[in-house]
Amino acid sequence: MRASFTLALTLASAATTVLAAPATPDALQRRAAGKLPFFFPKSVYERVAPTGPASFSKVSEAKAVQIATDFLVAKLGLAADEFKVANSFADASGTTHVYGAHQANGVRIANHQAAAHVQNGHVVSFSSSFGTSQHLIKPRIPPMNAKLTVDQAIGRAVESTGIPHHADFAAVSEYVNTGSDIVFAHKFQLRDEAKGQWVQVWADANTGEIVHSADFVHRLTYVVYDLPKASMIDGDPSPLVNPEDPLASPSGWADQYNLTMGNNAQSFRVATDGASPLFYRTYAGRYSFHVNPKLGPEWDGNSRASQFNSFYAVNVMHDISYHYGFTEAAGNFQADNFGKGGLGGDIVYVRDYVDSNSTDTAFIFVGADGQAAYMHLYRWTYTAPARNPGLDNTVTIHEYTHGISTRLTGGAATGQCLRDLESTSLGEGWSDFVALVLTAKASDTINKPVFIAQYSTGNPAGLRSYPYTTDMAVNPLKYSDLTTRTEPHAAGEVWVEMLWEMYWNLVTKYGFNANLYDAKSTAGNVVALQLVISGMMHQPCNPTIIQARDAILTADQTFYGGKFKCDIWKGFAKRGLGNGATVDKVNNFDLPWECLTVS
């Protein structure tokens, strides 16, 4: 059972196929020095008004999937066999989210993704990276000829990149849109964990050239301390009895030996001398530790504390996010999915590198559903002695949220829907925002400045350029700042500020619930978290900031009937992403007319 304590908490011929135009502002493309090529046609996202009489009758999930499929096939001008559903699930609002890909000759076109979202028999929104009026060119689909075998293509890729082949992932062959044509390619993965490299690549099956890639690494340059504590800065560790949520974690958190390993996660210290990973065991069923701030993270007691605390934080994130829709069917991280949908075998491995040569970083590898995630926590040397980010809940939550946003954006089966600059920046923003929500307290006030990684950095100002606050005299960031903020974390700060404005609009009017397991609550902080997580489900592959905002508005409609629309709009408009904002990143503070007189 979950303890009675409460928590404030908290990616044949097809000549008639319409494809993306090459190298236009409507495409997301990257090929810089030292980076592998990435091309993703710019996605269209539209909210759809119901047609015909209103219906409040729910339809079965199978029927909803068929409605979504029929809609997309008609909307995108496809034959019935040119679209294949990859995964689908229904959220708590009764909305069924259906994700899939364009295919030709029975083979998937990797970066042609589409999705439709169905509530009460109506499509409420859809997105697509192909087939709309925005996507103009009709290139030829080539035959599935391959001069190179998969092994030959892998060998060339390993030689050109210096990254070893990751054989645990079975290679497949797919088409990929390069921005100028369609290429038949072999898809496989390359990984070197020690160097923090894990990438999925598509290599031309005839030349071996890597034509597309998806980098699976999310980086952050920056006893349990139970949430909402951010770290020991907020007080002493607290004893928690049976903190597992029975719905989200029916088999509990820990294994039968009471080690820091279970169905959702494993947390362990990585040895540098070739020895086996070190797992700490509970004493008499008690995960307890003592932190000695005068000693470094390599001291056994501090290492134990970090593992216990990171194991706790990752499992709490698993359980809390489950109630907001990040379930097995949606692609969450579990070894055993208990027959509830999705692919199992993909827990989060939390690797503690306290005595590694690498320092001052934390990151997570996240692939598609069915592949485990790997969170790497290195010692931080901003202070003497150094510190371990496993004791900083804001860092661990930030990294885990990358897993949520990667799996939910575009559906869990793809793993390439947060890979361009703008969507990567959104990803950094969501990760900070969720960390702020999960460490928020009922006593917080609207203008209070809040921070990320205060403990890890040893700096009261934390890791970001400004504190997060609704006070624009303290944090002046607006939409227009994205013209100069081009690094993902710096750009992500702008997105966080917009979400934080929305959060406080909701909390001020609708209150605060310290129990974030209660996802059906209409308290402002709970609603804000639900809107953000559900917005991830609705938005397209590689969303723009405008599309991400609109997806949150769609989530408000599907979950709450649009009740919070004006609170959302006012939050975004205050920071320049108003109703008239465009991709030009010029500030616009307009509200929709219906919100002009709403208090």
Image (cartoon, helix red, strand yellow):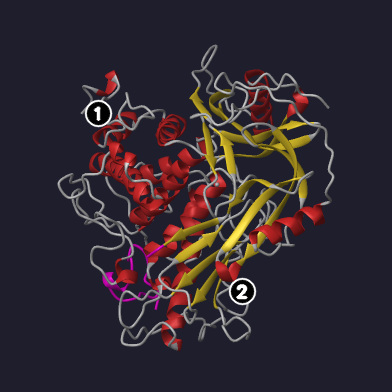
Q: Nearer the viewer, residue 206 or 248?
A: 206
The residue at the point 30 percent across, 35 percent down is 572
Q: How far across and how far down the image is residue 258, in percent?
A: 57, 78
Q: Main secondary structure of the magenta part?
A: loop
Residue bearing the label numbered 1: 589
Q: How far across and how far down the image is residue 467, in percent?
A: 24, 55
Task: Report the mark closest to the observer, 1 or 2.
Answer: 1
Q: Nearer the viewer, residue 446 or 493?
A: 493
Crowding at dot 1, Cα within 10 Å, few <14 / some 14-19 / many 20+, comes out as some
Q: Amino acid at mark 2?
A: Asp
Whether 227 is among the magenta residues is: yes
Q: How far across and how far down the image is residue 416, in percent?
A: 59, 45
Q: Amino acid at mark 1?
A: Phe
Residue bearing the label numbered 2: 255
231 w.r.t. 424: above or below: below
425 w.r.t. 154: above or below: above
